[in-house]
Amino acid sequence: MSDVHPVVIVGSGAAGLTAAVYAARANLKPIVIDGSLPGGQLTTTTDVENYPGFPEGVMGPELMERMRKQAERFGTQFIFDQVAECDFTSEIKVIKCNQQEIKAHTVVIATGASPRLLGLDAEKKLMGRGVSTCATCDGAFFRDANLVVVGGGDSAMEESTFLTKFAKKVYLVHRRQEFRASKIMQERALKNPKIEVIYDSAVSVINDVEKGEVTGVEIQNLKTKETHDLAVDGVFVAIGHIPNSAPFKGAIKTDENGYILTEKGTQTSAAGVFAAGDCVDHVYRQAITAAGMGCMAALDAERYLAARGLDT
Ligand code: NAP
């Protein structure tokens, strides 16, 4: 048996698993490399109310589990590993993972995006110890707490509002006067009596690394440069995402922010390599659009293989 797989899919979120369902049903025996967060970002959410076909809503992890089972049902094989680097220069593509090397005729990149961080030293050290990038995952740990949420987009509004279910007080810290968030999400956050907005400001220090927990932050007003301390128990960073395209650096073209460039559907700059979902799309970023692109990528891979007689 050839050790070159027809289709290797990198990533197991909505895009990757949908690509797997389509490729598996086309009898292409896809391999899915799970990555560091099997199921992708939807596994870190609670209710998903806008995925068609679920009129009562569905929990994010359950939706991903169902997609995974659907892909498995048609013969998808899953590999728990992470891609380190790739060589797409030949007909046969080489994917170097941490534990093994995988060869493929076609590759679907569906690696999603990861939360952007502020870049403070304490942020990483206190991640999971009071610092979080996911209110729906960690909010319940902060009952009656005082919290900071950083950001001015829909995520920051959504997370602040959600956190008021548990917290005593939420300070929403934004670096400008105007929010980027949609009007409806802004209004919901701004009329919430537990939320206090701190405009034109940044979190400049997070305390206390020594204690191994969040005890407070220093807030800097970016206009006056003045600082003041806030005693809080947690910091939620909601400042957008970074596409997970680092393992493909140099092998395919990306834009200046690292989003993978595609043309004619999902074709990347390397022949036989397709990309789908949040690693490509910084505009829509929805479960359903990622799934739709995953479907497109699988169909594009299938056509690529058929044109070369490699689809059997
Ligand atoms: P976003 O729209 O890119 O907003 C990021 C926010 O973080 C911006 O306000 C930005 O400030 C701020 N920011 C970026 N880097 C920062 C830094 N280093 N320090 C401090 N602040 C920083 O990201 P998002 O809110 O995650 O939303 C992403 C997409 O998902 C959007 O299309 C959004 O509509 C969608 N979304 C939708 C929902 C929903 O409808 N339920 C929920 C969440 C997200 P500036 O404004 O100054 O640039």
Image (spheres, rainbow, N blue to C red):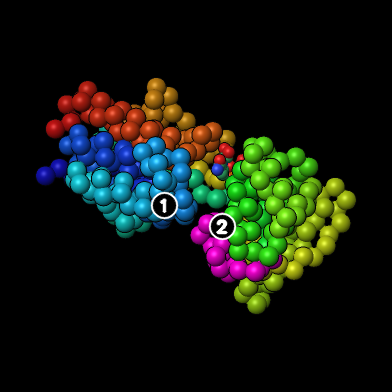
- Residue type (three-letter) at the residue carrying disc 2: Ala
Q: Above or below — where is 206 with respect to 10?
A: below
Residue 147: image x %, image y %? 67, 62
Disc 2 CB within 8 Å of nearest ligand 1 atom: no
Q: Is residue 139 magenta?
A: yes
Please name the amino acid that badge 1 sits on. Answer: Met
Residue 4 visible? The answer is: no
Instruction: Between residue 160 and residue 2, name the one nearer to us.
Output: 160
Q: Position of residue 226 (x, y in %)?
A: 86, 56
Secondary structure type for disc 2:
helix
Which residue of the protein is positioned furthest toward the bottom in this rendering?
211
Above or below for 201 versus 122: above
Q: Which residue is mark 2?
A: 135
Residue range corresponding to the magenta coloring: 126-146
- What's the CA distance linking mark 2 and mark 1? 15 Å
Classed neighbour count for the residue bearing mark 1: other residues with Cα under 10 Å, few (<14), some (14–19), many (≥20) = some
Q: Is residue 235 left or right of residue 79?
A: right
| Image x and y of residue 281, in percent | 49, 35
Res 59 label: 1
